[in-house]
Amino acid sequence: MEKLQTLDYVVFLFYFIIVSGYGYWIYKKKQAKQTSTKDFFLAEGSLTWWAIGASLIASNISAEQMIGMSGNGFSMGLAISTYEWMAAATLIVVAVVFMPIYLKNKIFTMPQFLSQRYNPTVSLIMAIFWLGLYILVNLTSILYLGALAVSGISGIDFWVCMWGLAIFAIIITIGGMKVIGYTDVIQVFFLVIGGLATTYLAINLVSDQYGLSGLVDGFKAMTQNHNDHFHMILNKGQMMYPNGKGELQDAFMELPGLTVLLGGMWIVNLNYWGCNQYITQRALGADLKTARNGLLFAAFLKLLMPIIVTLPGIAAYALYSKGLYQQEMSVNGHLVADKAYPVLLNLLPIGLKGLSFAALTAAVVASLAGKANSISTIFTLDIFKQYIGKNKTEQELVKIGRIVIVVAMILAILISPYMGIDKEGGFQFIQKMTGLLSPGIFASFAMGFFWKRTNSAGALFAIVGGFLIALSMHNNWLPFTDWTQVPFLDRMGLVFLICVAVMFVLGYVLPDEGKGLEIDASMFKVQGTFAVGAVAVIVILTFLYWYFW
Protein backbone atom coordinates (compact mmCIF):
# COMPACT_ATOMS: atom_id res chain seq x y z
CA MET A 1 0.00 0.00 0.00
CA GLU A 2 2.35 2.66 -1.33
CA LYS A 3 1.72 6.36 -1.17
CA LEU A 4 1.48 8.61 -4.22
CA GLN A 5 4.35 8.40 -6.69
CA THR A 6 5.72 10.94 -9.17
CA LEU A 7 3.33 9.92 -11.96
CA ASP A 8 0.37 10.24 -9.57
CA TYR A 9 1.39 13.79 -8.73
CA VAL A 10 1.78 14.58 -12.45
CA VAL A 11 -1.78 13.36 -13.10
CA PHE A 12 -3.07 15.34 -10.14
CA LEU A 13 -1.17 18.47 -11.24
CA PHE A 14 -2.72 18.12 -14.69
CA TYR A 15 -6.18 18.10 -13.06
CA PHE A 16 -5.32 21.12 -10.90
CA ILE A 17 -4.01 23.15 -13.85
CA ILE A 18 -7.02 22.30 -16.03
CA VAL A 19 -9.57 23.29 -13.38
CA SER A 20 -7.74 26.41 -12.19
CA GLY A 21 -6.86 27.55 -15.71
CA TYR A 22 -10.37 27.08 -17.05
CA GLY A 23 -11.86 28.79 -14.02
CA TYR A 24 -9.51 31.76 -14.44
CA TRP A 25 -10.37 31.99 -18.15
CA ILE A 26 -14.12 32.05 -17.37
CA TYR A 27 -13.51 34.67 -14.68
CA LYS A 28 -11.46 36.98 -16.96
CA LYS A 29 -13.87 36.53 -19.83
CA LYS A 30 -16.79 37.73 -17.70
CA GLN A 31 -14.85 40.01 -15.35
CA ALA A 32 -16.62 43.13 -16.52
CA LYS A 33 -19.91 41.73 -15.26
CA GLN A 34 -18.68 40.45 -11.91
CA THR A 35 -19.75 43.61 -10.10
CA SER A 36 -23.35 42.43 -10.43
CA THR A 37 -24.66 40.44 -7.45
CA LYS A 38 -26.98 38.50 -9.74
CA ASP A 39 -24.01 37.48 -11.90
CA PHE A 40 -21.76 36.65 -8.92
CA PHE A 41 -24.31 34.62 -6.97
CA LEU A 42 -26.56 33.24 -9.75
CA ALA A 43 -24.40 33.36 -12.94
CA GLU A 44 -27.01 35.74 -14.43
CA GLY A 45 -28.83 32.96 -16.26
CA SER A 46 -25.78 31.99 -18.32
CA LEU A 47 -25.44 28.35 -17.22
CA THR A 48 -26.45 25.74 -19.80
CA TRP A 49 -28.49 22.65 -18.89
CA TRP A 50 -25.40 20.44 -18.87
CA ALA A 51 -23.51 22.91 -16.67
CA ILE A 52 -26.46 23.07 -14.23
CA GLY A 53 -26.74 19.28 -14.07
CA ALA A 54 -23.01 18.72 -13.65
CA SER A 55 -22.76 21.46 -11.05
CA LEU A 56 -25.62 19.96 -9.04
CA ILE A 57 -23.81 16.61 -8.86
CA ALA A 58 -20.41 18.16 -8.22
CA SER A 59 -21.80 20.14 -5.31
CA ASN A 60 -23.66 17.11 -3.96
CA ILE A 61 -21.05 14.36 -4.29
CA SER A 62 -18.24 15.03 -1.88
CA ALA A 63 -16.25 13.46 0.92
CA GLU A 64 -19.39 12.40 2.76
CA GLN A 65 -20.35 10.26 -0.25
CA MET A 66 -16.92 9.14 -1.48
CA ILE A 67 -15.79 8.30 2.05
CA GLY A 68 -18.97 8.10 4.15
CA MET A 69 -21.25 6.32 1.68
CA SER A 70 -18.52 3.86 0.70
CA GLY A 71 -18.14 3.22 4.43
CA ASN A 72 -21.88 2.54 4.64
CA GLY A 73 -21.58 0.29 1.60
CA PHE A 74 -19.00 -1.67 3.62
CA SER A 75 -21.12 -1.74 6.76
CA MET A 76 -24.68 -2.27 5.44
CA GLY A 77 -24.43 -2.74 1.66
CA LEU A 78 -26.33 -1.45 -1.35
CA ALA A 79 -29.28 -0.21 0.74
CA ILE A 80 -27.45 3.06 1.45
CA SER A 81 -27.77 3.78 -2.30
CA THR A 82 -31.41 4.68 -1.68
CA TYR A 83 -30.17 8.20 -0.91
CA GLU A 84 -28.82 8.37 -4.47
CA TRP A 85 -31.58 6.58 -6.36
CA MET A 86 -34.44 8.26 -4.49
CA ALA A 87 -32.69 11.54 -5.25
CA ALA A 88 -33.11 10.81 -8.96
CA ALA A 89 -36.88 10.57 -8.51
CA THR A 90 -36.84 13.66 -6.31
CA LEU A 91 -35.01 15.70 -8.95
CA ILE A 92 -37.86 14.95 -11.37
CA VAL A 93 -40.39 16.16 -8.78
CA VAL A 94 -38.36 19.33 -8.17
CA ALA A 95 -38.09 19.99 -11.90
CA VAL A 96 -41.82 19.53 -12.48
CA VAL A 97 -43.22 21.18 -9.33
CA PHE A 98 -40.70 23.35 -7.47
CA MET A 99 -38.83 25.07 -10.31
CA PRO A 100 -41.86 26.61 -12.06
CA ILE A 101 -43.07 28.00 -8.71
CA TYR A 102 -39.69 29.58 -7.93
CA LEU A 103 -39.14 31.01 -11.41
CA LYS A 104 -42.74 32.24 -11.86
CA ASN A 105 -42.52 34.10 -8.55
CA LYS A 106 -38.96 35.35 -9.22
CA ILE A 107 -37.43 33.55 -6.23
CA PHE A 108 -33.60 33.65 -6.19
CA THR A 109 -32.79 32.63 -2.60
CA MET A 110 -34.62 30.43 -0.15
CA PRO A 111 -34.86 33.11 2.57
CA GLN A 112 -36.30 35.43 -0.09
CA PHE A 113 -39.10 32.90 -0.64
CA LEU A 114 -39.84 32.84 3.10
CA SER A 115 -39.86 36.63 3.28
CA GLN A 116 -42.10 36.98 0.24
CA ARG A 117 -44.49 34.19 1.28
CA TYR A 118 -44.49 34.83 5.05
CA ASN A 119 -42.56 37.74 6.62
CA PRO A 120 -38.99 39.00 7.19
CA THR A 121 -38.82 37.48 10.69
CA VAL A 122 -39.38 33.96 9.37
CA SER A 123 -36.84 34.62 6.64
CA LEU A 124 -34.18 35.93 9.05
CA ILE A 125 -34.58 33.02 11.47
CA MET A 126 -34.32 30.51 8.64
CA ALA A 127 -31.31 32.28 7.13
CA ILE A 128 -29.50 32.00 10.48
CA PHE A 129 -30.45 28.32 10.76
CA TRP A 130 -29.17 27.66 7.24
CA LEU A 131 -25.88 29.45 7.86
CA GLY A 132 -25.38 27.40 11.02
CA LEU A 133 -26.21 24.15 9.22
CA TYR A 134 -24.00 24.85 6.20
CA ILE A 135 -20.99 25.90 8.29
CA LEU A 136 -21.28 23.64 11.37
CA VAL A 137 -22.41 20.47 9.58
CA ASN A 138 -21.74 20.62 5.83
CA LEU A 139 -18.47 22.53 5.52
CA THR A 140 -16.95 20.92 8.62
CA SER A 141 -17.84 17.37 7.50
CA ILE A 142 -16.56 17.80 3.96
CA LEU A 143 -13.30 19.40 5.11
CA TYR A 144 -12.72 16.84 7.87
CA LEU A 145 -13.52 13.72 5.83
CA GLY A 146 -11.79 15.10 2.75
CA ALA A 147 -8.61 15.92 4.62
CA LEU A 148 -8.71 12.53 6.34
CA ALA A 149 -8.85 10.74 3.00
CA VAL A 150 -6.33 12.95 1.20
CA SER A 151 -3.90 12.64 4.10
CA GLY A 152 -4.29 8.86 4.20
CA ILE A 153 -3.59 8.55 0.48
CA SER A 154 -0.82 11.11 0.08
CA GLY A 155 0.90 10.92 3.47
CA ILE A 156 0.68 14.72 3.74
CA ASP A 157 -0.14 16.10 7.19
CA PHE A 158 -3.88 16.19 7.98
CA TRP A 159 -3.97 19.92 8.73
CA VAL A 160 -1.99 20.77 5.59
CA CYS A 161 -4.55 18.81 3.57
CA MET A 162 -7.45 20.59 5.23
CA TRP A 163 -6.02 24.06 4.59
CA GLY A 164 -5.03 23.08 1.04
CA LEU A 165 -8.56 21.90 0.18
CA ALA A 166 -10.04 25.05 1.70
CA ILE A 167 -7.71 27.37 -0.23
CA PHE A 168 -8.35 25.55 -3.53
CA ALA A 169 -12.11 25.85 -2.93
CA ILE A 170 -11.82 29.55 -2.07
CA ILE A 171 -9.95 30.20 -5.33
CA ILE A 172 -12.82 28.62 -7.27
CA THR A 173 -15.58 30.25 -5.19
CA ILE A 174 -14.45 33.87 -5.27
CA GLY A 175 -14.86 33.83 -9.04
CA GLY A 176 -18.62 33.57 -8.57
CA MET A 177 -21.31 31.10 -9.59
CA LYS A 178 -20.37 31.21 -13.28
CA VAL A 179 -16.84 29.97 -12.50
CA ILE A 180 -18.21 27.34 -10.10
CA GLY A 181 -20.81 26.13 -12.59
CA TYR A 182 -18.47 25.66 -15.54
CA THR A 183 -15.48 24.29 -13.60
CA ASP A 184 -17.90 21.80 -12.03
CA VAL A 185 -18.28 20.20 -15.46
CA ILE A 186 -14.56 19.34 -15.36
CA GLN A 187 -14.82 18.31 -11.71
CA VAL A 188 -17.62 15.86 -12.56
CA PHE A 189 -15.58 14.43 -15.44
CA PHE A 190 -12.67 13.63 -13.11
CA LEU A 191 -15.07 12.45 -10.41
CA VAL A 192 -16.84 9.98 -12.73
CA ILE A 193 -13.75 8.71 -14.57
CA GLY A 194 -11.65 8.37 -11.42
CA GLY A 195 -14.54 6.91 -9.45
CA LEU A 196 -15.30 4.28 -12.10
CA ALA A 197 -11.61 3.38 -12.25
CA THR A 198 -11.57 2.76 -8.48
CA THR A 199 -14.71 0.61 -8.69
CA TYR A 200 -13.27 -1.37 -11.62
CA LEU A 201 -10.07 -2.18 -9.80
CA ALA A 202 -11.84 -2.98 -6.51
CA ILE A 203 -14.18 -5.52 -8.13
CA ASN A 204 -11.28 -7.05 -10.06
CA LEU A 205 -9.41 -7.51 -6.78
CA VAL A 206 -12.43 -9.39 -5.44
CA SER A 207 -12.46 -11.51 -8.59
CA ASP A 208 -8.80 -12.42 -8.05
CA GLN A 209 -9.45 -13.44 -4.43
CA TYR A 210 -12.09 -15.94 -5.55
CA GLY A 211 -9.89 -17.38 -8.28
CA LEU A 212 -11.95 -15.75 -11.01
CA SER A 213 -11.20 -13.24 -13.72
CA GLY A 214 -12.82 -10.01 -14.82
CA LEU A 215 -15.38 -7.48 -13.74
CA VAL A 216 -18.51 -9.59 -14.33
CA ASP A 217 -17.18 -12.59 -12.41
CA GLY A 218 -16.07 -10.34 -9.56
CA PHE A 219 -19.53 -8.77 -9.27
CA LYS A 220 -21.17 -12.22 -9.35
CA ALA A 221 -18.83 -13.38 -6.58
CA MET A 222 -19.85 -10.38 -4.47
CA THR A 223 -23.58 -10.95 -4.96
CA GLN A 224 -23.35 -14.70 -4.33
CA ASN A 225 -21.03 -14.65 -1.32
CA HIS A 226 -22.34 -11.46 0.28
CA ASN A 227 -26.00 -11.47 -0.70
CA ASP A 228 -26.91 -9.64 2.54
CA HIS A 229 -25.13 -6.58 1.09
CA PHE A 230 -27.35 -6.45 -2.02
CA HIS A 231 -30.81 -5.58 -0.69
CA MET A 232 -32.39 -2.14 -0.98
CA ILE A 233 -35.11 -2.76 1.64
CA LEU A 234 -33.80 -3.85 5.04
CA ASN A 235 -35.58 -5.83 7.74
CA LYS A 236 -35.30 -5.51 11.50
CA GLY A 237 -32.29 -7.32 12.91
CA GLN A 238 -30.23 -7.00 9.72
CA MET A 239 -26.91 -6.11 11.28
CA MET A 240 -24.37 -3.63 10.00
CA TYR A 241 -20.69 -3.44 10.75
CA PRO A 242 -19.46 -0.72 13.09
CA ASN A 243 -17.70 2.55 12.48
CA GLY A 244 -15.23 2.64 15.34
CA LYS A 245 -17.70 1.46 18.00
CA GLY A 246 -16.48 -2.12 18.14
CA GLU A 247 -19.90 -3.80 17.97
CA LEU A 248 -22.53 -4.77 15.40
CA GLN A 249 -25.55 -2.50 15.03
CA ASP A 250 -29.04 -2.91 13.58
CA ALA A 251 -29.01 -1.38 10.09
CA PHE A 252 -32.80 -1.00 10.30
CA MET A 253 -32.19 1.98 12.61
CA GLU A 254 -30.52 3.78 9.71
CA LEU A 255 -32.77 2.60 6.86
CA PRO A 256 -36.09 1.39 8.32
CA GLY A 257 -37.62 -0.80 5.65
CA LEU A 258 -40.33 0.76 3.46
CA THR A 259 -39.73 4.18 5.05
CA VAL A 260 -37.08 4.66 2.36
CA LEU A 261 -39.85 4.46 -0.26
CA LEU A 262 -42.93 5.78 1.51
CA GLY A 263 -41.79 7.87 4.49
CA GLY A 264 -39.01 10.02 5.84
CA MET A 265 -36.66 9.52 2.89
CA TRP A 266 -38.93 11.73 0.79
CA ILE A 267 -38.61 14.51 3.37
CA VAL A 268 -34.81 14.17 3.31
CA ASN A 269 -34.67 14.39 -0.47
CA LEU A 270 -37.38 16.95 -1.17
CA ASN A 271 -35.93 19.27 1.44
CA TYR A 272 -32.37 18.78 0.17
CA TRP A 273 -33.05 19.09 -3.55
CA GLY A 274 -36.02 21.46 -3.47
CA CYS A 275 -35.54 23.79 -0.49
CA ASN A 276 -31.76 23.99 -0.30
CA GLN A 277 -29.94 27.14 -1.36
CA TYR A 278 -26.69 25.59 -2.58
CA ILE A 279 -28.60 23.10 -4.73
CA THR A 280 -31.44 25.17 -6.20
CA GLN A 281 -29.07 28.10 -6.72
CA ARG A 282 -27.68 26.46 -9.86
CA ALA A 283 -31.07 26.47 -11.57
CA LEU A 284 -32.62 29.68 -10.20
CA GLY A 285 -30.76 31.88 -12.64
CA ALA A 286 -31.97 29.95 -15.70
CA ASP A 287 -35.22 29.77 -17.68
CA LEU A 288 -37.64 26.92 -16.90
CA LYS A 289 -36.71 24.70 -19.86
CA THR A 290 -32.98 24.95 -19.14
CA ALA A 291 -33.48 24.42 -15.41
CA ARG A 292 -35.65 21.34 -15.98
CA ASN A 293 -33.23 19.77 -18.44
CA GLY A 294 -30.36 20.44 -16.04
CA LEU A 295 -32.22 18.69 -13.22
CA LEU A 296 -33.02 15.77 -15.55
CA PHE A 297 -29.35 15.43 -16.46
CA ALA A 298 -28.51 15.40 -12.75
CA ALA A 299 -31.13 12.66 -12.21
CA PHE A 300 -29.44 10.42 -14.78
CA LEU A 301 -26.05 11.06 -13.16
CA LYS A 302 -27.60 10.13 -9.80
CA LEU A 303 -28.50 6.70 -11.18
CA LEU A 304 -24.79 6.17 -11.83
CA MET A 305 -23.51 7.33 -8.44
CA PRO A 306 -23.92 4.07 -6.44
CA ILE A 307 -21.47 2.41 -8.85
CA ILE A 308 -18.91 5.05 -7.83
CA VAL A 309 -19.66 5.54 -4.13
CA THR A 310 -21.29 2.31 -2.87
CA LEU A 311 -19.87 -0.63 -4.83
CA PRO A 312 -16.26 0.13 -3.77
CA GLY A 313 -17.36 -0.15 -0.14
CA ILE A 314 -19.04 -3.51 -0.79
CA ALA A 315 -15.92 -4.69 -2.61
CA ALA A 316 -13.81 -3.60 0.37
CA TYR A 317 -16.11 -5.65 2.62
CA ALA A 318 -15.63 -8.70 0.38
CA LEU A 319 -11.84 -8.30 0.61
CA TYR A 320 -12.02 -7.74 4.37
CA SER A 321 -14.10 -10.91 4.74
CA LYS A 322 -11.27 -12.83 3.05
CA GLY A 323 -8.91 -11.62 5.78
CA LEU A 324 -7.31 -8.81 3.78
CA TYR A 325 -6.50 -5.25 4.95
CA GLN A 326 -7.94 -5.83 8.42
CA GLN A 327 -5.18 -3.80 10.05
CA GLU A 328 -5.62 -0.96 7.56
CA MET A 329 -9.36 -0.89 8.27
CA SER A 330 -8.89 -0.54 12.02
CA VAL A 331 -8.22 2.30 14.45
CA ASN A 332 -7.17 1.39 18.00
CA GLY A 333 -8.21 -2.19 17.35
CA HIS A 334 -11.75 -1.27 16.19
CA LEU A 335 -13.06 -1.60 12.66
CA VAL A 336 -13.74 1.78 11.02
CA ALA A 337 -15.91 1.41 7.93
CA ASP A 338 -15.11 4.92 6.68
CA LYS A 339 -11.55 3.77 5.96
CA ALA A 340 -12.78 1.50 3.14
CA TYR A 341 -12.41 4.01 0.30
CA PRO A 342 -8.96 5.37 1.31
CA VAL A 343 -7.70 1.79 1.67
CA LEU A 344 -8.93 0.97 -1.85
CA LEU A 345 -7.32 4.08 -3.31
CA ASN A 346 -3.98 3.03 -1.87
CA LEU A 347 -4.27 -0.27 -3.78
CA LEU A 348 -4.53 1.42 -7.18
CA PRO A 349 -1.58 1.22 -9.59
CA ILE A 350 0.66 4.24 -10.14
CA GLY A 351 -1.00 6.85 -12.38
CA LEU A 352 -4.48 5.50 -11.81
CA LYS A 353 -4.07 6.33 -8.14
CA GLY A 354 -3.37 9.94 -9.15
CA LEU A 355 -6.53 10.00 -11.26
CA SER A 356 -8.66 8.69 -8.39
CA PHE A 357 -6.94 11.10 -6.02
CA ALA A 358 -7.93 13.90 -8.41
CA ALA A 359 -11.53 12.55 -8.45
CA LEU A 360 -11.71 12.64 -4.68
CA THR A 361 -10.22 16.13 -4.56
CA ALA A 362 -12.64 17.27 -7.28
CA ALA A 363 -15.58 15.97 -5.26
CA VAL A 364 -14.41 17.74 -2.11
CA VAL A 365 -13.45 21.05 -3.71
CA ALA A 366 -16.57 21.33 -5.89
CA SER A 367 -18.84 20.66 -2.94
CA LEU A 368 -16.97 23.11 -0.71
CA ALA A 369 -17.22 25.78 -3.41
CA GLY A 370 -20.96 25.27 -3.85
CA LYS A 371 -21.71 25.44 -0.15
CA ALA A 372 -19.41 28.42 0.43
CA ASN A 373 -21.09 30.31 -2.40
CA SER A 374 -24.51 29.64 -0.88
CA ILE A 375 -23.33 30.73 2.58
CA SER A 376 -22.09 33.92 0.96
CA THR A 377 -25.35 34.40 -0.96
CA ILE A 378 -27.60 33.98 2.07
CA PHE A 379 -25.50 36.19 4.34
CA THR A 380 -24.94 38.94 1.77
CA LEU A 381 -28.36 39.17 0.13
CA ASP A 382 -30.68 38.03 2.92
CA ILE A 383 -28.99 39.40 6.04
CA PHE A 384 -26.34 42.03 5.28
CA LYS A 385 -28.15 43.78 2.43
CA GLN A 386 -31.53 43.71 4.22
CA TYR A 387 -30.45 44.76 7.72
CA ILE A 388 -26.96 46.30 7.62
CA GLY A 389 -25.87 47.51 4.20
CA LYS A 390 -29.05 48.73 2.52
CA ASN A 391 -27.16 51.50 0.73
CA LYS A 392 -24.20 49.41 -0.39
CA THR A 393 -23.37 49.29 -4.10
CA GLU A 394 -23.30 46.09 -6.14
CA GLN A 395 -19.48 46.10 -6.07
CA GLU A 396 -19.43 46.46 -2.28
CA LEU A 397 -21.91 43.60 -1.83
CA VAL A 398 -19.82 41.29 -4.02
CA LYS A 399 -16.75 42.20 -1.93
CA ILE A 400 -18.67 41.35 1.27
CA GLY A 401 -19.67 38.05 -0.32
CA ARG A 402 -16.03 37.16 -1.00
CA ILE A 403 -15.01 38.02 2.56
CA VAL A 404 -17.80 35.80 3.91
CA ILE A 405 -16.48 32.88 1.83
CA VAL A 406 -13.05 33.13 3.45
CA VAL A 407 -14.42 33.60 6.97
CA ALA A 408 -16.82 30.64 6.65
CA MET A 409 -14.03 28.35 5.47
CA ILE A 410 -11.72 29.35 8.34
CA LEU A 411 -14.50 28.82 10.90
CA ALA A 412 -15.23 25.36 9.48
CA ILE A 413 -11.56 24.35 9.72
CA LEU A 414 -11.31 25.46 13.34
CA ILE A 415 -14.60 23.82 14.39
CA SER A 416 -14.43 20.51 12.47
CA PRO A 417 -12.31 18.46 14.93
CA TYR A 418 -14.86 19.06 17.71
CA MET A 419 -18.04 17.98 15.88
CA GLY A 420 -17.75 14.22 16.49
CA ILE A 421 -17.87 13.50 12.74
CA ASP A 422 -15.77 10.35 13.10
CA LYS A 423 -17.93 8.66 15.75
CA GLU A 424 -20.79 7.24 13.67
CA GLY A 425 -19.72 7.68 10.06
CA GLY A 426 -19.52 10.92 8.13
CA PHE A 427 -22.50 10.36 5.84
CA GLN A 428 -24.89 9.35 8.61
CA PHE A 429 -23.65 12.23 10.80
CA ILE A 430 -24.71 14.73 8.13
CA GLN A 431 -28.08 13.04 7.57
CA LYS A 432 -28.97 13.02 11.26
CA MET A 433 -27.88 16.61 11.91
CA THR A 434 -29.64 17.90 8.79
CA GLY A 435 -32.68 15.84 9.79
CA LEU A 436 -33.20 18.07 12.82
CA LEU A 437 -34.19 20.91 10.49
CA SER A 438 -35.51 19.13 7.38
CA PRO A 439 -39.10 18.31 8.50
CA GLY A 440 -39.95 21.85 9.59
CA ILE A 441 -38.29 23.50 6.59
CA PHE A 442 -40.01 21.22 4.09
CA ALA A 443 -43.37 21.67 5.84
CA SER A 444 -43.07 25.47 5.64
CA PHE A 445 -42.20 25.31 1.93
CA ALA A 446 -44.75 22.68 0.88
CA MET A 447 -47.62 24.30 2.78
CA GLY A 448 -46.54 27.72 1.56
CA PHE A 449 -46.65 26.50 -2.03
CA PHE A 450 -50.07 24.90 -2.08
CA TRP A 451 -52.27 26.26 0.72
CA LYS A 452 -52.94 29.98 0.64
CA ARG A 453 -54.12 30.15 4.27
CA THR A 454 -50.71 29.00 5.55
CA ASN A 455 -49.51 31.89 7.69
CA SER A 456 -46.33 33.23 9.28
CA ALA A 457 -47.18 31.81 12.71
CA GLY A 458 -47.48 28.35 11.20
CA ALA A 459 -44.19 28.69 9.33
CA LEU A 460 -42.46 29.94 12.47
CA PHE A 461 -43.76 26.95 14.43
CA ALA A 462 -42.63 24.53 11.72
CA ILE A 463 -39.10 25.95 11.51
CA VAL A 464 -38.39 26.65 15.20
CA GLY A 465 -40.87 24.27 16.85
CA GLY A 466 -40.07 21.46 14.43
CA PHE A 467 -36.37 21.84 15.17
CA LEU A 468 -36.96 21.78 18.94
CA ILE A 469 -39.19 18.69 18.71
CA ALA A 470 -36.64 16.88 16.52
CA LEU A 471 -33.81 17.88 18.87
CA SER A 472 -35.79 16.63 21.88
CA MET A 473 -36.39 13.28 20.17
CA HIS A 474 -32.73 13.04 19.18
CA ASN A 475 -31.68 13.51 22.81
CA ASN A 476 -34.63 11.44 24.20
CA TRP A 477 -36.02 14.39 26.18
CA LEU A 478 -39.66 13.64 25.28
CA PRO A 479 -41.92 11.15 27.11
CA PHE A 480 -44.02 8.23 25.78
CA THR A 481 -41.20 6.07 24.38
CA ASP A 482 -37.43 5.70 24.04
CA TRP A 483 -37.01 7.95 21.02
CA THR A 484 -33.40 6.85 20.50
CA GLN A 485 -34.82 3.44 19.50
CA VAL A 486 -37.01 4.98 16.80
CA PRO A 487 -35.18 5.19 13.43
CA PHE A 488 -34.29 8.81 12.68
CA LEU A 489 -36.10 8.69 9.32
CA ASP A 490 -39.29 7.68 11.11
CA ARG A 491 -38.78 10.49 13.65
CA MET A 492 -38.44 12.92 10.74
CA GLY A 493 -41.74 11.72 9.29
CA LEU A 494 -43.49 12.16 12.63
CA VAL A 495 -42.09 15.68 13.15
CA PHE A 496 -43.21 16.63 9.63
CA LEU A 497 -46.78 15.44 10.32
CA ILE A 498 -46.85 17.40 13.61
CA CYS A 499 -45.68 20.55 11.82
CA VAL A 500 -48.29 20.19 9.06
CA ALA A 501 -51.08 19.55 11.59
CA VAL A 502 -50.21 22.65 13.63
CA MET A 503 -49.91 24.74 10.46
CA PHE A 504 -53.41 23.65 9.41
CA VAL A 505 -54.84 24.58 12.81
CA LEU A 506 -53.12 28.00 12.83
CA GLY A 507 -54.18 28.58 9.24
CA TYR A 508 -57.84 28.17 10.17
CA VAL A 509 -57.69 29.92 13.56
CA LEU A 510 -55.71 33.02 12.54
CA PRO A 511 -56.73 35.58 9.88
CA ASP A 512 -55.74 34.94 6.26
CA GLU A 513 -52.59 36.96 5.50
CA GLY A 514 -53.31 36.90 1.76
CA LYS A 515 -49.76 36.03 0.71
CA GLY A 516 -50.38 33.01 -1.50
CA LEU A 517 -48.06 32.46 -4.46
CA GLU A 518 -48.90 32.88 -8.12
CA ILE A 519 -49.64 29.32 -9.24
CA ASP A 520 -51.68 27.82 -12.09
CA ALA A 521 -51.94 24.28 -13.48
CA SER A 522 -50.22 25.14 -16.76
CA MET A 523 -46.96 25.77 -14.89
CA PHE A 524 -46.55 22.06 -14.20
CA LYS A 525 -47.03 20.73 -17.73
CA VAL A 526 -44.07 18.83 -19.21
CA GLN A 527 -43.40 17.76 -22.76
CA GLY A 528 -40.74 16.79 -25.27
CA THR A 529 -37.32 15.52 -24.28
CA PHE A 530 -37.82 16.21 -20.59
CA ALA A 531 -41.02 14.13 -20.44
CA VAL A 532 -39.35 11.17 -22.18
CA GLY A 533 -36.27 11.43 -19.96
CA ALA A 534 -38.35 11.67 -16.76
CA VAL A 535 -40.29 8.51 -17.66
CA ALA A 536 -36.99 6.73 -18.41
CA VAL A 537 -35.61 7.64 -14.96
CA ILE A 538 -38.74 6.31 -13.20
CA VAL A 539 -38.69 3.06 -15.22
CA ILE A 540 -35.01 2.46 -14.43
CA LEU A 541 -35.59 3.15 -10.73
CA THR A 542 -38.56 0.78 -10.61
CA PHE A 543 -36.45 -1.97 -12.12
CA LEU A 544 -33.53 -1.37 -9.72
CA TYR A 545 -35.71 -1.52 -6.60
CA TRP A 546 -37.52 -4.61 -7.92
CA TYR A 547 -34.26 -6.41 -8.78
CA PHE A 548 -32.46 -5.60 -5.52
CA TRP A 549 -35.51 -5.76 -3.24
Image: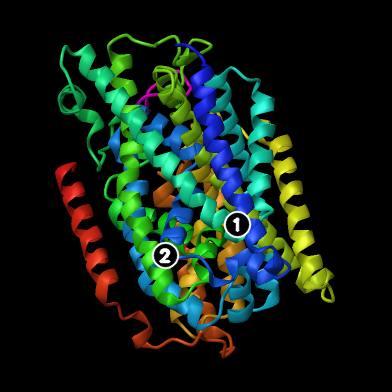
Answer few, some or many: residues within 10 Å of disc 1's Cα (few below 14, many 20 plus, some between 14 and 19).
Answer: some
- The number of callouts visible is 2
**What residue is pinned by disc 1?**
26
Q: What residue type is labelled 2?
A: Trp
Q: Residue at x 64, y 51 (%)?
A: 24
- Specify whether 453 is left or right of 393: left
Work out whether mark 1 precedes mark 2 in sequence or the reverse, and give the earlier one: 1
Residue 472, how many percent across, how many down?
Answer: 57, 49
Q: Nearer the viewer, residue 324 or 28?
A: 28
- Specify whether 435 is left or right of 540: right
User: Could you tell me what secondary structure mostly forms the magenta stretch?
Assistant: loop
Q: Is residue 245 magenta?
A: yes
Which quadrant would the N terminus be assigned to in this image? top left
Structural distance between the alpha carbons of marks 1 and 2: 17 Å
Res. 108 image quadrant: bottom right
Q: Residue at x 52, y 63 (%)?
A: 282
SS at circle 1: helix
- Specify whether 134 is left or right of 394: left
Q: Nearer the viewer, residue 292 or 514?
A: 292
**What residue is pinned by disc 2?**
49
SS at circle 2: helix
Which quadrant would the C terminus be assigned to in this image? top left
